[in-house]
Structure formats: C-alpha cells, structure tokens
C-alpha cells in the first residue's frame, strides 16, 4: 500500500508540475493582452495549488472511517445548498446557469460538494447494508432515490454533464458492491429516453451535440472552437512545434488556457506530449 501511495504521489506531482508549465505557456499572451501581466493566470494557478496542498494535508490526517458519521449531514447540507441556488439574488448566474455562490473573490459550486457528499453517503450505505446489496427495496431503491433528488436539483441549474458523471460513478459503486446487474441495466435503459429528451429539448444542448458530431457544418459559428482545437492538435504532429511556440493561442483558439489547453499541449509537444499526459492520468 505504501508503494502504491508513493507512485500515486510521484505521478500527481508530475502532472502538477506539467500543468504549471502549460498554464503559463497557454495563458501568458492572453494575460498580457488583457491583464497587462503575463503571469496573471500562472500566479492564480499557483495560489490554488497552495490551497489544494494545505487541504490535502488536512484530509490525509483524517481517518476515513470517521466519515461514516458525517455521511448524512454532509448530504443534507449539500442538498440545502443546491436548493439555495434556486433563490434569486443568492446565487451567481453565468450564461443562463445558476451554479455558483460568490464568496469574496472566489466562486463556490455546490454541485461539486454534492458529488463528494453523494459518494461518501453511498459508500457508507453500502458498508452498512452489505447483506442487502441484492435487495431492490432496501439495498438499491434508497440509493437511487437519493441520487434522483440530487440529480434533479443539479439539472435545474442546469448542469446535465455533472448529473451524467455522478450517475456513472454511483452505478459503478453499486456494481462493485455486488448489486444485481438487472437493477443497474434497468436504470440505464429507463434513463436513456430522458437523456435524449434533455439533450434535444434544450436548444443549446442540441446545438452543442450536433456541433460535436459535425463542427464543419458551421465552421465560422458554433463549430469554430472545435475546428480550431482540431487544427491546433493536428498541427503539432509527432514531436510538436516546441514549448511556447503555439500559434493557436494567438487569439485563434478561444479558451486556449482553460477548456482547450489539451490542444495547446498537442500543438507544442506533439503526439508524444498528449499520449504522455493521458498515460500519467491512467
């Protein structure tokens, strides 16, 4: 176990260091143009890394078995926060979505807390109900019901991506616990029509899905960003154009230092850089 922890620590440190380098490479020009400080996003990233490091040290000192006591309170608090998001004036609205509370200069997203709380709750429930994991009424239905409440509140924001990700994680946990597979497949089959309706009933989701499938249908509109990301990723070839030598980040690729930083990695470090990054995550 100790050897596994060391390997995990080394890989995590490699990804963190690589992330620092690529954040600066992808954001320096944009930061200079808009903030008059090329290191603006680098400094902010380092600040969050320090906070993350302090929190991780704190979490490492906690006996995870003690989380059982806080499983239900954490879940209830998360649900309350998700409900408070719906109250106008309390939450922050960005792009038509109410997903954030603004605390001083920091944004707090309750759905992130809800995901962690839900995972802790399900883990505690499984460990407490080991003998009932194959019981639909007492071992499966309670978890799915709670998941439905949390997922419903997140969907209202709206945030379909988080709901899908959380549902997959919870179903995997139930599968590992030994739950009857027919229950899991039933949930998946029943959710497919709802997922289809959710995607294609909202114009922006429908447009996003169709753009993802064929960005070239609207190369100068909705498909512009995806096309530029593909061009950047492909232009790096096998070995890349060199660290810091990206052309896509010169205002060709929107969100180059955030959602599409992987394209910058591909352009500057090539196929080896992208494959290496993916392997580190694996």
Image: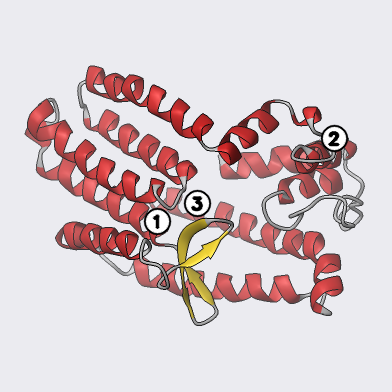
Circle 3 sits in a helix, a strand or a loop, which is it?
helix
Figure check: 32 above or below 120: below
Q: Nearer the viewer, residue 230 or 128?
A: 230
Residue 8: mark in rendering: 3
**253 and 132: which one is in front?**
253
Where is residue 38, by image quadrant?
bottom right
Which of discs 2 and 1 lies nearer the camera? The answer is 1
The answer to whether mark 2 and mark 3 are in CB contact below 8 A is no
The Cα atoms of the two marked residues, 3 and 1, are separated by 26 Å
Residue 107 vs residue 243: left or right? left
Along the line of sight, the residue nearer the viewer: 217 or 248: 217
Q: CA distance from mark 2 to mark 3?
A: 31 Å
Say left or right for 135 vs 59: left
Residue lying at 26% horizontally and 33% vertically, measured from the top left = 174
* Up/down of 11 relative to 179, above or below: below
Which residue is the extreme one toward the top?
Answer: 182
Question: Which SS class for mark 2?
Answer: helix
Comparing labels 2 and 3, the label whose residue is closer to the camera: 2
Q: Residue 82 location, x and y as percent?
A: 33, 59
Q: CA distance from mark 2 to mark 1?
A: 35 Å
Q: Earlier in the sequence, mark 2 or mark 3?
A: 3
Q: How is the image coloured?
A: secondary structure
Quadrant for the C terminus in the image: top right
Residue drawn at x 71%, y 71% is: 41
Q: Report if residue 64 is visible in the image.
A: no
Q: Which residue is mark 2?
A: 234
């Amino acid at each position: 176990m100790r050897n596994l922890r060391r390997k995990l620590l080394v890989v995590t440190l490699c990804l963190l260091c690589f992330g620092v380098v690529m954040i600066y490479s992808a954001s320096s020009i944009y930061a200079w143009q808009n903030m008059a400080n090329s290191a603006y996003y680098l400094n902010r990233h380092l600040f969050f890394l320090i906070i993350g490091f302090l929190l991780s040290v704190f979490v490492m000192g906690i006996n995870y078995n003690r989380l059982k006591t806080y499983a239900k309170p954490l879940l209830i608090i998360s649900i309350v926060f998700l409900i408070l998001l719906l109250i106008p004036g309390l939450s922050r609205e960005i792009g038509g979505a109410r997903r954030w509370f603004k605390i001083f200069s920091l944004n707090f997203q309750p759905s992130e807390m809800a995901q962690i709380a839900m995972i802790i709750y399900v883990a505690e429930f499984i460990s407490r109900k080991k003998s009932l994991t194959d019981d639909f009424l007492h071992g499966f239905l309670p978890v799915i019901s709670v998941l439905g409440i949390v997922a419903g509140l997140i969907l209202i924001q709206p945030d379909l991506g988080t709901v899908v990700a959380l549902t997959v994680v919870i179903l995997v946990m139930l599968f590992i616990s030994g739950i009857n597979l027919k229950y899991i497949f039933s949930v998946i089959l029943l959710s497919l029509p709802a997922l289809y309706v959710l995607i294609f009933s909202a114009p922006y989701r429908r447009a996003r899905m169709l753009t993802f499938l064929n960005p070239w249908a609207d190369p100068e509109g909705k498909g512009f960003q995806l096309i530029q990301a593909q061009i950047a990723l492909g232009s790096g070839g096998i070995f890349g154009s060199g660290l810091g030598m990206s052309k896509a980040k010169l205002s060709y690729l929107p969100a180059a230092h955030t959602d599409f930083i992987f394209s910058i990695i591909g352009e500057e470090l090539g196929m080896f850089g992208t494959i290496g990054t993916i392997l580190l995550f694996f």
